[in-house]
Structures are given as C-alpha cells and as structure tokens.
Amino acid sequence: MRSASWYGDPESYELRQTLSKLQGVPMQNILVGSGIDDLLGLVVRVFLNPGDVAVASAGTYPTFAYHVKGYGGQVHRVPYTDELHHDLTAIAYAARKREAKIIYLANPDNPSGTYYRGSDIKRFLDDVPNHCVVILDEAYIDFAPEDAKVQTEDPRLITMRTFSKAHGLAGTRIGYAICNSEIIDAFHKVRLHYGVNSIAQAGALASLNDREFVQSVVREVEQGRRDYKRLGAKLGLKTIESHTNFVCFDMGDAATARRTMNELLKRSVFVRRFDSPPFDRFIRVTVGSPVERKMFADIFEEVMHVTSMS
Ligand SMILES: *Cc1c(COP(=O)(O)O)cnc(C)c1O
C-alpha cells in the first residue's frame, strides 16, 4: 500500500479485482462502499423519490429505514412470521400493492438470526413486481450454511456484503455490493468517490487473502452459539436458532426482557432489546470470546435469580 498521505484508490481496483476472482462476478458488477450502511443510502438515493414507498420487515436491521426517511420516503413494515422469519409472501404482496420501489431483506436476518435458502429467495424474486429492486443484505453470509447463497442474475437484485462481521474490520468501514452494471453506473453518479479510505482497502484485501482467519472466526462463533443454546436450556430459556454472531434469548415477555437488560447493564453487560413485537420479549447477546461468554453466563445466571425474585 502507498502512504496514507496519498489519496486512496477511488475505484478500489485491486480489491474489486480480488473479489471478482473469488466470487466469479465481473468487476463492473462490484461496487465498494464504506460498509453496508453507506451502500444502503446509495440505493435509496438512486431509486427512491420523496413520497415513494419501500418495504421491509417490522423490526429488522434499522439503517435502511433511516435512509428512506432521510430521503423523504416511507417504509411499509411487514410483520415477521410466527417462526420469526421474514414473511416473504406478505413482503412481495405489499410491494405489489403499494407499488414499492425497494424491498430490503437481510439474510441471515438481524435481529432474529434466522435465514432462508437461496432457492427460497429466488422463488420470492418471481413474486416481486418488475419495477422494484431488492436489497439482499448478506452481512452474516459467512456464518450461514452454504445453501443460503442465491444463484441468480436477476437484474433487480442488489446483494450486499461487509468486512465488519466475520472479517473483523468493523471500525475501518468497508463493504461491497454486487449487482447489475447499470445500477452501478447510477451509483457512480452520486457516491462519495474517496469515501472508502486506503487503510480499509488494504485491510479488506489482506483479510480476503487470509481465509484461515475468517474460517477460524466462523468456527469460534459456531461454538459460541452452541454455548449460548446450552446456557439457555440450563436457565429454562428458549433461544432462536441463529446463523449469525449473536443469539436471542426469549425472556417470555417485553417487561421481563427490559428488566433483564437493565439488571445486566447495572453489572456493565450491554445486550440489545427491541421495541417492536415479536422481538420485544427477547434480548440479543453477541457471541464474543470464550472469556466474555463465561463472564456473561455467570452474570446472566445471577440476574435471572434477581429478576425471578422481584
Ligand atoms: C452489522 C450489519 C450491517 C452493517 O454493516 P457495515 O458494513 O458495518 O455498515 C448491515 N446489515 C446488517 C444486517 C448488519 O447486521
């Protein structure tokens, strides 16, 4: 890498070249951005006019909705199924009915941790109206089973990946989109050309050349999910089968979830809880390192005693 006193490469050429080889996708179908959060904003800016509608699950990863609101659009939110999956049928139906411009779908999903097979997503695309693009947010794809990947060249599909999760580069801000080259041309007209810094590009390239590291993270995270599943069983709590780097514990109801989070916070443990049903009864806990998991298990057990007595 050249010195950081120079501007970085606005094309992320080397990184796109490497991604192209690894993914078997032509370079002109890859755009690098400052993380998925940045790329989500580009899609909204390009495809959504003020007053337009976008569709997403109610309670899914929130950044897409922030961008939609910021550009004067409206998010139509579709409830999850009882099994805590995206309701693909209802999402496609809503997109047709509301003449949506964009659908946002995270697979595997955050915060549920559930996933769909690529073949399910492909079938879903058949139901999506032609005027609508679909963002497939694959932030957690490295943690998912192989069959989660979608095999399609559907021109409406914009797939997004990040170096923030399995690659461990969240602080450097870098991710990429794979899509139709016409869509990429539209992104070039509005994107911030030096927004992806040279240190992030070098880090992303280095991590692509270190598959061992990513595989070790994925294995470690699988172990962590098993630990949490066992912890849940021991404490009499259901957990959602996760394909990400976190696990949701079912606290039974929203009040208990809130109380548990506050008690954990008093003990310097930060977990997430959610306002939107059905996730309002869950707390979401990051897998972390074995030492962190042990600490969490001890403190969580103590908190369970405290909250069950009050
Ligand atoms: C973490 C996360 C992101 C953010 O990715 P960045 O590349 O760090 O912006 C996007 N989507 C989902 C579902 C996430 O969990």
Image: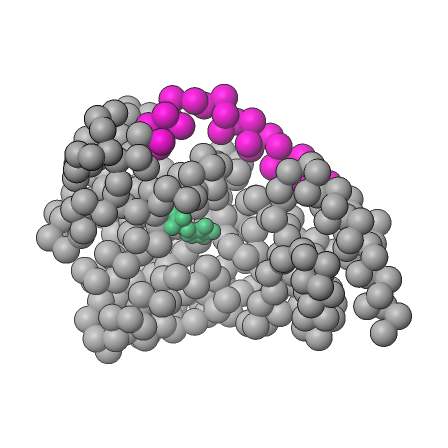
Residue at figure coordinates x 25%, y 57% from the top left: 43
Task: Give above or below for 94 relative to 202.
Answer: below
Q: What residue is at 69 percent from the left and 36 percent from the top? A: 290
Q: Nearer the viewer, residue 96 or 301?
A: 301
Looking at the rendering, in which quadrant would you find the C terminus? Answer: bottom right
Residue at point 40%, 28% (across, down): 207
The colour scheme used here is one colour
Query: Outermost residue, front direction?
Result: 5
Residue furthest to the right in view is 309
Look at the magenta stretch and give its main secondary structure.
helix
Report the side of 110 relative to 158 (left or right): right
Residue 248: x, y in percent?
64, 55
Q: Which residues are magenta?
A: 203-227
Asked whether the viewer can see residue 193, the reply is: yes
Q: Nearer the viewer, residue 180 or 261?
A: 261
Would you say residue 231 sits in the magenta stretch? no
Where is residue 200 drawn, in percent x and y?
32, 37
Q: Residue furthest bottom?
A: 51
Q: Is residue 83 above or below residue 115?
A: below
Residue 179 is at least partly visible in this image: no
